[in-house]
Amino acid sequence: MGKLLANGCSHMAGSESTTSVADLFAKHLDIDCVNLSHPGGSNHRILRSTIEYIEENGKPDFVLIGWTTQERFEFTWKGERADYTLDKHSDDTDLEKFYRYLDLNVCDFEIGKENTILYIFLLQQYLENNKIDYMFCNMYNAIPEGYQSNIWNLINLDKYYLHHTSLIEDAMKEYPEGWSETQHAVDPAIHQSMCDKLIEFVRRPNV
């Protein structure tokens, strides 16, 4: 069978649910799903791990990327790779203090947005240069409408669903119930609805 490579954060992973958008999307295509999504992961991690996987395992038939909230980034702690996300906590007292330092002094949505746009462009170029079919979407957070930058103007929006909003934010309006306290969709019908929207987008003519 063919292979779908999916990547994102907890929302694309299907955290706290029996299914995920990625699983349902792969089922629609009748191909296997490799889901690299990682709860709390950053957009930098999405870029890095997607390229690493393809270089190590060969080209998938389709890549589905769900970009995440923009303030996140990777760092090293005691020689191990770690993820920062706003208001994250740890039982390690020193790491907990470091998180609070990052909250106050390093976390910046504007810089995060600029970095995210660069990551989007770099992954777009990698996939297109390697002739790998793909689709991007925002699982959570988005590029503001009317936003202008030299790099953003290079993004292929024909391959990017909901660049000015996000699947989760739209689904919360459509489905007031079916969410966990951490804003994960626990109702499989919500994942199916989000998947259906992606399928409708990818089926558009000339895309």
Image (tube, helix red, strand yellow):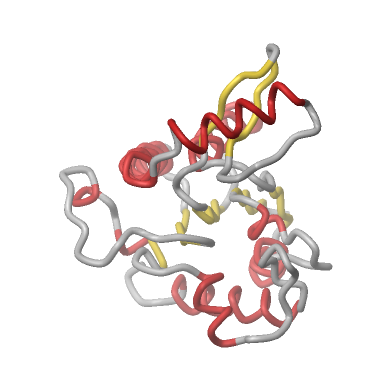
Seen in the picture, residue 78 relative to 16 is either above or below; the reply is above
Seen in the picture, residue 69 relative to 170 is either above or below; the reply is above
The residue lying toward the viewer, choosing from 109 and 103, is 103
Q: Position of residue 109 (x, y in %)?
A: 38, 46
**Residue at 69% across / 66% down in the picture?**
184
**Residue at 36% across / 63% down in the picture?**
163
Q: Position of residue 33 (x, y in %)?
A: 71, 54
Disc count in the image? 0
Seen in the picture, residue 80 relative to 145 is either above or below; the reply is above
With 81 as the anchor, is 107 left or right in this view? left
Residue farthest right in this picture: 18
The residue lying toward the viewer, choosing from 34 and 44, is 44
Residue 129 visible here: no
Q: Position of residue 127 (x, y in %)?
A: 43, 42
The residue lying toward the viewer, choosing from 119 and 25, is 119
**Residue at 60% across / 45% down in the picture?**
87
Image quadrant where one finds the C terminus: bottom left
The residue lying toward the viewer, choosing from 94 and 144, is 94
Image quadrant where one finds the N terminus: bottom right
Image quarter for residue 171? bottom right
Residue 47 visible here: yes
